[in-house]
Image (spheres, rainbow, N blue to C red):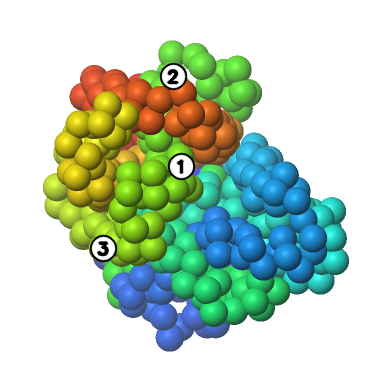
Amino acid sequence: MKMEIKGDVEGGKHKGVREPLIGEKNKQLVNETKDYHHPWMVYFTTFIAVCGSFEFGVCVGYSSPTQDAIRKDLSLSLAEYSLFGSILTFGAMIGAITSGPIADLVGRKGAMRVSSAFCIAGWLVIYFSKGPIPLDIGRLATGYGMGVFSYVVPVFIAEIAPKERRGVLTTLNQFMIVIGGSTAFIFGTILSWRALSIIGLIPTAVLLLGLFFIPESPRWLAKRGLTKDFVAALQILHGKDADISQEAKEIQDYITSLEQLAKPKVLDLFQKRYLRSLTIGVGLMVCQQFGGINGVGFYASSIFDLAGFPSVTGTILFAILQIVITGVGAALIDKAGRKPLLLVSGSGLVTGSIFTAVAFYLKAHDLGVGAVPALALAGLLVYIGSFAIGMGAVPWVVMSEIFPVNIKGQAGSIATLVNWFGAWLCSYTFNFLMSWSSYGTFILYAAINALAILFIVVAVPETKGKSLEQLQAAINA
């Protein structure tokens, strides 16, 4: 269906959305949110969305501080608890596969509601669990919700944010994941495991309530042919006195051009038209996960112990630095650009891996043993700081920007699935690799991160300062 935008939008100056344009349904939407008709609506909408990112972090961080208490209370073996911890990733893979189609079918807000429902159900099942089976079912459900959040939150933010602030707002996704994980770890040391599962309900409750007060993604509404809803949502986000005519026309024209194409199937994503964006999206997810982050992150405490550095001190420094540098990256992304941050991040990951490899090489060959703890600490802090400045958040930002709206669901699901598969593979193989060779493990990670730098230089474009339509048209021409 070809969309038409009538009234003042075509005329140039837009003095707000008038009743004849938005109709009764949209009049109600505008009236309900009239107090938010100013530019801060974008920030409020982003805040509501990243409650899903915070929930993501809580899900990931839950298992670490609760391990001893859950095993004791429910008499779980180490193997049973390991299944409980790892089944989260399998739930996330299922969530990744279905997240794109769900977000395309019921909207970005609808997908967040679905994800929240699974997380709420999962936490309640965990809270009432009396044995390993319901515990695993609850963990699987929260993993599914987490997998959907990992796709839909950055995509939604990218679609509602102005181009000059899109990077920093989308990066808040990763920042809130880190904050959520740290919150779970801290509260897990002072609360019972059942009480901590109730804490996991709070971000989803805030999200579900907030969804009543924010608009749907204008670009999703435009893709669905809901012209009046699309214009109303765009006006709400920009403010009642903002001129939205140019952006509305740009989105309309781009959607119209996409409607002339046949609806792509999964195999069509590998055609020349879409292959570049798919390669960039999937390639960045491979770079992010296969460089060792989940092995290092999940087992940081044991790495510090192995290197002879106090694990509690090392883990606290590790967590604090990750939070601080993620915030710095969010502040820089729209100024420095996506590609420079990725290159700096990749270079730091190589350096941190080499430092850590040298530390374990010295220990393995009984050379300069006194320097091993300090060198390992420096290597791991350089590693996590470098990951936080770019490779942690930027791949999600770029993924949310490069896919055209007609393939965003399918392509985004593939990229997210690759990410979660890489997360599982990295965490699963880490202990085996360390048993083979501690310094060899980090040499391998250094080599993979060096290849990631090469991929970024050759394949990844700079995306800052461009509208989604401009960017996607250039990449997928």
Residue position marked by numbered label 3 in the rendering: 324
The residue located at (54%, 79%) in the rendering is 190
Residue at the disc numbered 2: 275
Q: Are marks 1 and 2 in contact (CB under 8 Å)?
A: no
- Badge 3: residue crowd in 10 Å (few <14, some 14–19, many ≥20): some
Q: What residue sits 38% from the left and 57% below the top? A: 311
Q: Which callout, 2 or 3, points at the residue further toward the start of the chain?
A: 2
Residue ID at (28%, 34%): 363
Q: Mark 1 points at which residue?
A: 294
What crowding class fits label 2: few (fewer than 14 Cα within 10 Å), some (14-19), or many (20 or more)? some
Look at the picture and state if 1 lies above or below 203. Answer: above
Q: Which residue is more in the foreground, 352 or 71?
A: 71
The residue nearer to you, when weighing 383 against 280, is 383
The answer to which quarter of the image holds residue 342 is top left
Quadrant in the picture for the C terminus: top left
Mark 2 touches mark 3? (CB < 8 Å): no
> Is 32 placed above or below 300 here?
below
Q: What's the CA distance linking mark 1 and mark 2? A: 28 Å
